[in-house]
Amino acid sequence: MVTETESPLITSNYKPTKELSNEGADLVDRAKTYIRAILHDSLHIQPSERVYILYDEDVELTQILTAAYADIANEHTNIDFTNFNQHTADDILAHLATLKANDCVILIQSQQFRLNEYRIRLELFKRNIKTIEHLHLNIIKPKEYKNYVESLAFSPVKYRDLALRIKDKLDKCQKVLVECQDGSQCEYTGGMNDCKLNIGDYKGMSGIGGTYPIGEVFTESRDLSKVNGQMSIWAYPSLAKTLEIPPEPIVLTIKNGLIEFDPENGIYPKNSTETFNQLLTLIRDGEGEICVREFGLGLNEGMGKSAIVTDVSAFERQHGMHISLGKKHNVYKTSAIKTKQTRFHIDVFIDLKNITILDDNTCLFDDGKYLV
Protein backbone atom coordinates (compact mmCIF):
# COMPACT_ATOMS: atom_id res chain seq x y z
CA MET A 1 0.00 0.00 0.00
CA VAL A 2 1.32 3.45 -0.91
CA THR A 3 1.52 6.33 1.52
CA GLU A 4 0.14 8.93 -0.87
CA THR A 5 -2.98 8.75 -2.98
CA GLU A 6 -2.20 8.22 -6.67
CA SER A 7 -5.81 8.02 -7.88
CA PRO A 8 -9.28 8.80 -6.53
CA LEU A 9 -10.07 6.70 -3.47
CA ILE A 10 -13.50 5.82 -4.83
CA THR A 11 -14.42 5.11 -8.43
CA SER A 12 -17.84 4.11 -9.71
CA ASN A 13 -16.43 1.53 -12.08
CA TYR A 14 -13.43 -0.74 -12.45
CA LYS A 15 -10.68 0.61 -14.66
CA PRO A 16 -8.01 -2.10 -15.00
CA THR A 17 -4.43 -0.89 -15.21
CA LYS A 18 -3.32 -4.09 -16.96
CA GLU A 19 -4.76 -5.81 -20.00
CA LEU A 20 -6.24 -9.26 -19.51
CA SER A 21 -5.06 -12.21 -21.56
CA ASN A 22 -7.56 -13.82 -23.94
CA GLU A 23 -7.94 -16.70 -21.47
CA GLY A 24 -8.52 -14.22 -18.65
CA ALA A 25 -11.22 -12.40 -20.61
CA ASP A 26 -12.99 -15.71 -21.25
CA LEU A 27 -12.91 -16.49 -17.53
CA VAL A 28 -14.45 -13.11 -16.71
CA ASP A 29 -17.44 -14.07 -18.85
CA ARG A 30 -17.80 -17.39 -17.01
CA ALA A 31 -17.35 -15.81 -13.58
CA LYS A 32 -20.01 -13.13 -14.15
CA THR A 33 -22.85 -15.63 -13.98
CA TYR A 34 -21.53 -17.33 -10.85
CA ILE A 35 -20.87 -14.07 -9.02
CA ARG A 36 -24.28 -12.69 -9.84
CA ALA A 37 -25.80 -15.84 -8.32
CA ILE A 38 -23.66 -15.46 -5.16
CA LEU A 39 -24.81 -11.89 -4.65
CA HIS A 40 -28.46 -12.70 -5.33
CA ASP A 41 -28.91 -16.20 -3.87
CA SER A 42 -26.57 -16.04 -0.86
CA LEU A 43 -26.14 -12.37 0.07
CA HIS A 44 -29.54 -11.20 -1.25
CA ILE A 45 -28.16 -7.82 -2.27
CA GLN A 46 -30.88 -5.17 -2.58
CA PRO A 47 -30.78 -2.02 -4.78
CA SER A 48 -30.69 0.21 -1.69
CA GLU A 49 -27.57 -1.53 -0.30
CA ARG A 50 -24.12 -0.26 -1.16
CA VAL A 51 -21.49 -2.60 -2.57
CA TYR A 52 -17.84 -1.73 -1.96
CA ILE A 53 -15.18 -3.68 -3.85
CA LEU A 54 -11.65 -3.47 -2.46
CA TYR A 55 -9.16 -5.12 -4.79
CA ASP A 56 -5.58 -5.32 -5.96
CA GLU A 57 -4.17 -6.20 -9.38
CA ASP A 58 -1.03 -8.06 -8.34
CA VAL A 59 -2.02 -11.21 -10.24
CA GLU A 60 -4.34 -11.79 -13.17
CA LEU A 61 -6.84 -13.77 -11.07
CA THR A 62 -7.59 -10.68 -8.95
CA GLN A 63 -8.23 -8.77 -12.18
CA ILE A 64 -10.53 -11.52 -13.46
CA LEU A 65 -12.64 -11.53 -10.31
CA THR A 66 -12.78 -7.74 -10.02
CA ALA A 67 -13.92 -7.43 -13.63
CA ALA A 68 -16.58 -10.10 -13.04
CA TYR A 69 -17.91 -8.35 -9.93
CA ALA A 70 -17.85 -5.04 -11.81
CA ASP A 71 -20.38 -6.47 -14.25
CA ILE A 72 -23.11 -6.14 -11.61
CA ALA A 73 -22.81 -2.36 -12.06
CA ASN A 74 -25.07 -2.88 -15.06
CA GLU A 75 -27.93 -3.71 -12.69
CA HIS A 76 -26.74 -2.31 -9.34
CA THR A 77 -25.68 1.32 -9.53
CA ASN A 78 -24.79 1.76 -5.85
CA ILE A 79 -21.29 0.30 -6.20
CA ASP A 80 -17.81 1.66 -5.41
CA PHE A 81 -14.29 0.43 -6.15
CA THR A 82 -10.91 1.05 -4.50
CA ASN A 83 -7.52 -0.24 -5.61
CA PHE A 84 -5.99 -1.25 -2.28
CA ASN A 85 -2.40 -0.70 -3.39
CA GLN A 86 -2.98 2.93 -4.31
CA HIS A 87 -4.31 4.23 -0.99
CA THR A 88 -3.45 4.47 2.68
CA ALA A 89 -4.98 2.34 5.41
CA ASP A 90 -6.46 5.45 7.04
CA ASP A 91 -8.27 6.47 3.85
CA ILE A 92 -9.71 3.00 3.32
CA LEU A 93 -10.76 2.66 6.96
CA ALA A 94 -12.47 6.04 6.76
CA HIS A 95 -14.54 4.86 3.80
CA LEU A 96 -15.38 1.54 5.47
CA ALA A 97 -16.68 3.56 8.43
CA THR A 98 -19.32 5.16 6.17
CA LEU A 99 -20.95 1.80 5.38
CA LYS A 100 -24.17 0.80 7.09
CA ALA A 101 -25.72 -2.49 8.18
CA ASN A 102 -26.63 -4.73 5.20
CA ASP A 103 -24.18 -2.98 2.89
CA CYS A 104 -21.69 -5.35 1.28
CA VAL A 105 -17.89 -5.44 1.03
CA ILE A 106 -16.03 -7.63 -1.47
CA LEU A 107 -12.32 -8.24 -0.75
CA ILE A 108 -10.33 -9.49 -3.76
CA GLN A 109 -6.82 -10.14 -2.49
CA SER A 110 -3.66 -11.56 -4.00
CA GLN A 111 -2.54 -12.16 -0.41
CA GLN A 112 -4.57 -10.77 2.52
CA PHE A 113 -5.20 -7.09 3.09
CA ARG A 114 -3.80 -5.61 6.29
CA LEU A 115 -5.22 -2.40 7.70
CA ASN A 116 -3.11 -1.91 10.80
CA GLU A 117 -4.70 -4.03 13.57
CA TYR A 118 -8.12 -3.92 11.91
CA ARG A 119 -9.42 -7.43 11.16
CA ILE A 120 -11.53 -6.47 8.19
CA ARG A 121 -14.09 -9.26 7.86
CA LEU A 122 -14.60 -9.76 11.60
CA GLU A 123 -15.05 -6.06 12.23
CA LEU A 124 -17.50 -5.74 9.34
CA PHE A 125 -19.51 -8.70 10.61
CA LYS A 126 -19.84 -6.96 13.97
CA ARG A 127 -21.52 -4.10 12.12
CA ASN A 128 -23.81 -6.48 10.19
CA ILE A 129 -22.08 -5.67 6.92
CA LYS A 130 -22.13 -8.51 4.40
CA THR A 131 -18.61 -9.56 3.42
CA ILE A 132 -17.05 -11.86 0.85
CA GLU A 133 -13.34 -12.62 0.85
CA HIS A 134 -11.23 -14.02 -1.95
CA LEU A 135 -7.71 -14.38 -0.59
CA HIS A 136 -4.29 -15.92 -1.29
CA LEU A 137 -4.99 -15.68 -5.01
CA ASN A 138 -1.27 -15.28 -5.72
CA ILE A 139 -0.76 -18.90 -4.60
CA ILE A 140 -3.00 -20.22 -7.37
CA LYS A 141 -1.24 -21.11 -10.63
CA PRO A 142 -2.52 -19.62 -13.91
CA LYS A 143 -3.40 -23.09 -15.20
CA GLU A 144 -5.70 -23.44 -12.15
CA TYR A 145 -7.61 -20.18 -12.68
CA LYS A 146 -10.38 -22.00 -14.53
CA ASN A 147 -10.82 -24.42 -11.62
CA TYR A 148 -11.07 -21.56 -9.14
CA VAL A 149 -13.65 -19.77 -11.27
CA GLU A 150 -15.68 -22.96 -11.68
CA SER A 151 -15.64 -23.46 -7.90
CA LEU A 152 -17.63 -20.22 -7.61
CA ALA A 153 -20.54 -21.96 -9.36
CA PHE A 154 -21.42 -23.66 -6.06
CA SER A 155 -24.93 -22.58 -5.11
CA PRO A 156 -27.05 -23.13 -1.99
CA VAL A 157 -30.06 -23.36 -4.30
CA LYS A 158 -28.62 -26.55 -5.81
CA TYR A 159 -26.82 -28.08 -2.81
CA ARG A 160 -28.82 -27.08 0.28
CA ASP A 161 -30.98 -30.21 0.31
CA LEU A 162 -27.98 -32.52 -0.14
CA ALA A 163 -26.09 -30.77 2.66
CA LEU A 164 -29.07 -31.07 5.00
CA ARG A 165 -29.47 -34.78 4.23
CA ILE A 166 -25.78 -35.39 4.99
CA LYS A 167 -26.09 -33.40 8.20
CA ASP A 168 -29.18 -35.35 9.27
CA LYS A 169 -27.41 -38.69 8.79
CA LEU A 170 -24.21 -37.69 10.58
CA ASP A 171 -25.97 -35.89 13.44
CA LYS A 172 -27.98 -39.01 14.30
CA CYS A 173 -25.44 -41.78 13.73
CA GLN A 174 -23.27 -43.61 16.26
CA LYS A 175 -20.80 -45.32 13.92
CA VAL A 176 -19.21 -44.20 10.66
CA LEU A 177 -16.83 -46.26 8.54
CA VAL A 178 -14.47 -44.56 6.09
CA GLU A 179 -12.90 -46.79 3.43
CA CYS A 180 -10.10 -45.59 1.17
CA GLN A 181 -9.12 -46.62 -2.34
CA ASP A 182 -6.33 -48.89 -1.05
CA GLY A 183 -8.75 -50.75 1.24
CA SER A 184 -7.67 -49.05 4.46
CA GLN A 185 -10.54 -48.40 6.86
CA CYS A 186 -11.15 -46.09 9.81
CA GLU A 187 -14.09 -46.21 12.20
CA TYR A 188 -15.64 -43.33 14.12
CA THR A 189 -17.70 -44.56 17.09
CA GLY A 190 -19.78 -42.83 19.74
CA GLY A 191 -21.46 -40.33 17.45
CA MET A 192 -20.50 -37.06 15.80
CA ASN A 193 -20.97 -33.47 16.89
CA ASP A 194 -23.75 -31.51 15.20
CA CYS A 195 -22.64 -30.76 11.65
CA LYS A 196 -21.96 -27.23 10.50
CA LEU A 197 -22.72 -26.10 6.97
CA ASN A 198 -20.69 -23.77 4.79
CA ILE A 199 -22.97 -23.63 1.76
CA GLY A 200 -23.86 -19.96 1.33
CA ASP A 201 -27.15 -20.18 3.23
CA TYR A 202 -26.82 -17.48 5.88
CA LYS A 203 -30.35 -17.44 7.28
CA GLY A 204 -30.24 -16.92 11.04
CA MET A 205 -26.48 -16.30 11.08
CA SER A 206 -24.92 -13.23 12.67
CA GLY A 207 -22.36 -12.80 9.89
CA ILE A 208 -23.48 -12.92 6.27
CA GLY A 209 -20.72 -13.99 3.89
CA GLY A 210 -17.31 -15.53 4.40
CA THR A 211 -14.30 -16.81 2.53
CA TYR A 212 -15.03 -18.10 -0.97
CA PRO A 213 -15.16 -20.62 -2.56
CA ILE A 214 -17.63 -22.45 -0.32
CA GLY A 215 -19.31 -25.86 -0.19
CA GLU A 216 -18.70 -28.00 2.88
CA VAL A 217 -20.36 -30.00 5.65
CA PHE A 218 -18.09 -30.56 8.63
CA THR A 219 -18.16 -32.13 12.06
CA GLU A 220 -15.90 -34.15 14.36
CA SER A 221 -16.18 -37.13 16.66
CA ARG A 222 -17.92 -36.33 19.96
CA ASP A 223 -15.16 -38.29 21.66
CA LEU A 224 -11.93 -37.67 19.79
CA SER A 225 -10.42 -40.85 21.25
CA LYS A 226 -13.02 -42.96 19.42
CA VAL A 227 -11.35 -42.70 16.02
CA ASN A 228 -9.42 -45.84 15.10
CA GLY A 229 -8.03 -47.49 11.99
CA GLN A 230 -6.20 -46.33 8.89
CA MET A 231 -6.86 -43.71 6.23
CA SER A 232 -4.82 -42.93 3.16
CA ILE A 233 -4.33 -39.36 1.98
CA TRP A 234 -3.66 -38.23 -1.58
CA ALA A 235 -2.71 -34.61 -0.84
CA TYR A 236 -1.61 -32.38 2.02
CA PRO A 237 -0.32 -28.82 2.52
CA SER A 238 3.35 -28.04 2.28
CA LEU A 239 4.98 -25.89 4.94
CA ALA A 240 4.40 -23.03 2.47
CA LYS A 241 0.64 -23.82 2.68
CA THR A 242 0.37 -24.96 -0.93
CA LEU A 243 -1.12 -28.27 -2.02
CA GLU A 244 1.39 -31.11 -2.28
CA ILE A 245 0.61 -34.45 -3.94
CA PRO A 246 2.89 -37.39 -2.99
CA PRO A 247 3.92 -40.06 -5.53
CA GLU A 248 1.52 -42.51 -3.88
CA PRO A 249 -1.09 -42.13 -1.14
CA ILE A 250 0.27 -41.92 2.41
CA VAL A 251 -1.38 -44.27 4.90
CA LEU A 252 -2.11 -42.82 8.33
CA THR A 253 -2.53 -45.18 11.27
CA ILE A 254 -4.87 -43.73 13.89
CA LYS A 255 -5.14 -45.14 17.40
CA ASN A 256 -7.49 -43.58 19.93
CA GLY A 257 -7.71 -40.45 17.81
CA LEU A 258 -3.95 -39.94 17.47
CA ILE A 259 -1.65 -40.41 14.48
CA GLU A 260 1.07 -42.98 15.08
CA PHE A 261 4.33 -41.13 14.41
CA ASP A 262 7.53 -41.78 16.32
CA PRO A 263 10.63 -41.11 14.20
CA GLU A 264 12.97 -41.89 17.08
CA ASN A 265 11.69 -45.48 16.98
CA GLY A 266 11.29 -45.70 13.22
CA ILE A 267 7.49 -45.33 13.17
CA TYR A 268 6.27 -43.36 10.15
CA PRO A 269 3.09 -43.44 8.05
CA LYS A 270 3.38 -45.89 5.16
CA ASN A 271 4.61 -44.21 1.95
CA SER A 272 5.34 -41.00 3.85
CA THR A 273 7.49 -38.30 2.28
CA GLU A 274 10.13 -36.05 3.75
CA THR A 275 7.84 -33.02 3.54
CA PHE A 276 4.93 -34.82 5.18
CA ASN A 277 7.20 -36.03 7.97
CA GLN A 278 8.26 -32.41 8.46
CA LEU A 279 4.60 -31.43 8.77
CA LEU A 280 3.92 -34.15 11.35
CA THR A 281 7.04 -33.20 13.28
CA LEU A 282 5.89 -29.58 13.38
CA ILE A 283 2.55 -30.61 14.92
CA ARG A 284 4.04 -33.12 17.35
CA ASP A 285 6.73 -30.73 18.57
CA GLY A 286 4.19 -27.93 18.99
CA GLU A 287 1.38 -29.91 20.63
CA GLY A 288 3.02 -33.06 22.02
CA GLU A 289 0.95 -35.43 19.86
CA ILE A 290 -0.95 -35.45 16.56
CA CYS A 291 -4.70 -35.35 17.06
CA VAL A 292 -7.34 -36.06 14.39
CA ARG A 293 -10.19 -33.55 14.63
CA GLU A 294 -12.31 -32.26 11.75
CA PHE A 295 -14.31 -34.68 9.61
CA GLY A 296 -14.97 -32.56 6.54
CA LEU A 297 -17.06 -33.39 3.49
CA GLY A 298 -16.48 -31.07 0.55
CA LEU A 299 -19.40 -30.58 -1.84
CA ASN A 300 -17.78 -28.27 -4.37
CA GLU A 301 -17.57 -30.10 -7.70
CA GLY A 302 -15.45 -27.35 -9.22
CA MET A 303 -12.39 -28.73 -7.40
CA GLY A 304 -10.98 -32.22 -6.94
CA LYS A 305 -8.23 -34.59 -8.07
CA SER A 306 -8.72 -33.58 -11.68
CA ALA A 307 -9.33 -29.90 -10.88
CA ILE A 308 -6.56 -28.75 -8.55
CA VAL A 309 -6.42 -25.39 -6.77
CA THR A 310 -3.07 -24.97 -5.04
CA ASP A 311 -4.37 -22.77 -2.21
CA VAL A 312 -5.34 -25.24 0.51
CA SER A 313 -7.74 -22.82 2.23
CA ALA A 314 -9.84 -22.86 -0.95
CA PHE A 315 -9.23 -26.49 -1.87
CA GLU A 316 -10.60 -27.89 1.40
CA ARG A 317 -14.09 -27.50 -0.15
CA GLN A 318 -13.13 -29.91 -2.96
CA HIS A 319 -15.56 -32.71 -3.75
CA GLY A 320 -14.52 -35.41 -1.29
CA MET A 321 -13.29 -35.77 2.27
CA HIS A 322 -10.63 -34.13 4.39
CA ILE A 323 -9.63 -34.42 8.02
CA SER A 324 -7.70 -31.95 10.13
CA LEU A 325 -4.54 -32.80 12.04
CA GLY A 326 -3.71 -30.86 15.18
CA LYS A 327 -5.67 -29.82 18.26
CA LYS A 328 -6.95 -26.48 17.02
CA HIS A 329 -10.56 -25.99 15.94
CA ASN A 330 -12.27 -22.61 16.00
CA VAL A 331 -15.80 -24.04 15.94
CA TYR A 332 -15.80 -27.13 18.16
CA LYS A 333 -14.60 -26.91 21.74
CA THR A 334 -13.90 -29.92 23.94
CA SER A 335 -12.97 -30.22 27.59
CA ALA A 336 -10.36 -32.81 26.57
CA ILE A 337 -8.27 -30.08 24.93
CA LYS A 338 -7.40 -26.79 26.59
CA THR A 339 -7.36 -23.83 24.22
CA LYS A 340 -3.84 -22.82 25.24
CA GLN A 341 -2.63 -26.24 24.06
CA THR A 342 -3.85 -25.70 20.49
CA ARG A 343 -1.66 -24.42 17.69
CA PHE A 344 -2.40 -26.33 14.50
CA HIS A 345 -5.35 -27.11 12.23
CA ILE A 346 -3.93 -28.70 9.08
CA ASP A 347 -6.26 -30.21 6.48
CA VAL A 348 -5.21 -33.37 4.63
CA PHE A 349 -7.21 -34.95 1.82
CA ILE A 350 -8.52 -38.50 2.06
CA ASP A 351 -8.14 -40.90 -0.88
CA LEU A 352 -11.78 -41.77 -0.42
CA LYS A 353 -13.64 -44.81 -1.72
CA ASN A 354 -16.79 -44.79 0.39
CA ILE A 355 -18.37 -43.68 3.66
CA THR A 356 -20.92 -45.91 5.40
CA ILE A 357 -23.22 -45.14 8.33
CA LEU A 358 -22.91 -48.45 10.18
CA ASP A 359 -26.06 -47.89 12.27
CA ASP A 360 -28.25 -48.76 9.27
CA ASN A 361 -25.64 -49.53 6.57
CA THR A 362 -26.50 -46.37 4.65
CA CYS A 363 -23.84 -45.60 2.06
CA LEU A 364 -23.21 -41.86 2.33
CA PHE A 365 -20.57 -41.65 -0.41
CA ASP A 366 -19.43 -44.11 -3.07
CA ASP A 367 -17.94 -44.06 -6.56
CA GLY A 368 -17.24 -40.34 -6.33
CA LYS A 369 -20.81 -39.37 -5.44
CA TYR A 370 -22.89 -38.53 -2.39
CA LEU A 371 -25.78 -40.98 -2.27
CA VAL A 372 -28.21 -39.65 0.36
Image: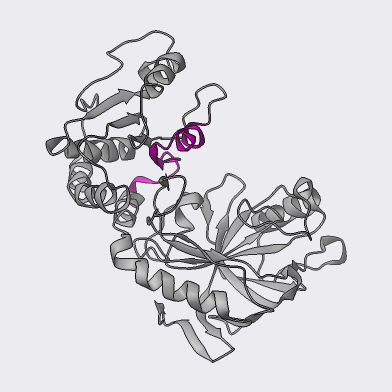
Q: What number of labels is visible?
A: 0
Front-most of residues 4 and 45: 45
Does residue 68 lie above or below 256 as drawn? above
In this picture, is 220 found above or below 121?
Answer: below
Residue drawn at x 57%, y 59% is: 236
Residue at horizontal 36 percent and vertical 21 percent from the top: 98
Residue most toward the left?
A: 74
Task: Give left or right: position of 298 versus 274.
Answer: left
Q: Which residue occupies the foreground of this view, 46 or 167?
A: 46
Q: Residue at x 13, y 39 (%)?
A: 75
Percent from the top left, x then y, of residue 89?
Answer: 45, 17
Up the image or down, 342 lies above or below 13; here it is below
- Residue 346 position, x and y percent, is 62, 54
Instruction: In the rendered view, tell whether residue 143 sits above or below residue 227.
Output: above
Q: Is residue 127 magenta?
A: yes
Instruction: State the residue in front, 46 or 150.
Output: 46
Which of the pair 359/321 is nearer the observer? 359
Q: Quadrant of residue 88?
A: top left
Q: Which stretch did the figure color magenta?
A: 119-143
Residue furthest to the bottom: 360
Q: Position of residue 180 (x, y in %)?
A: 56, 79
Quadrant showing the N terminus: top left
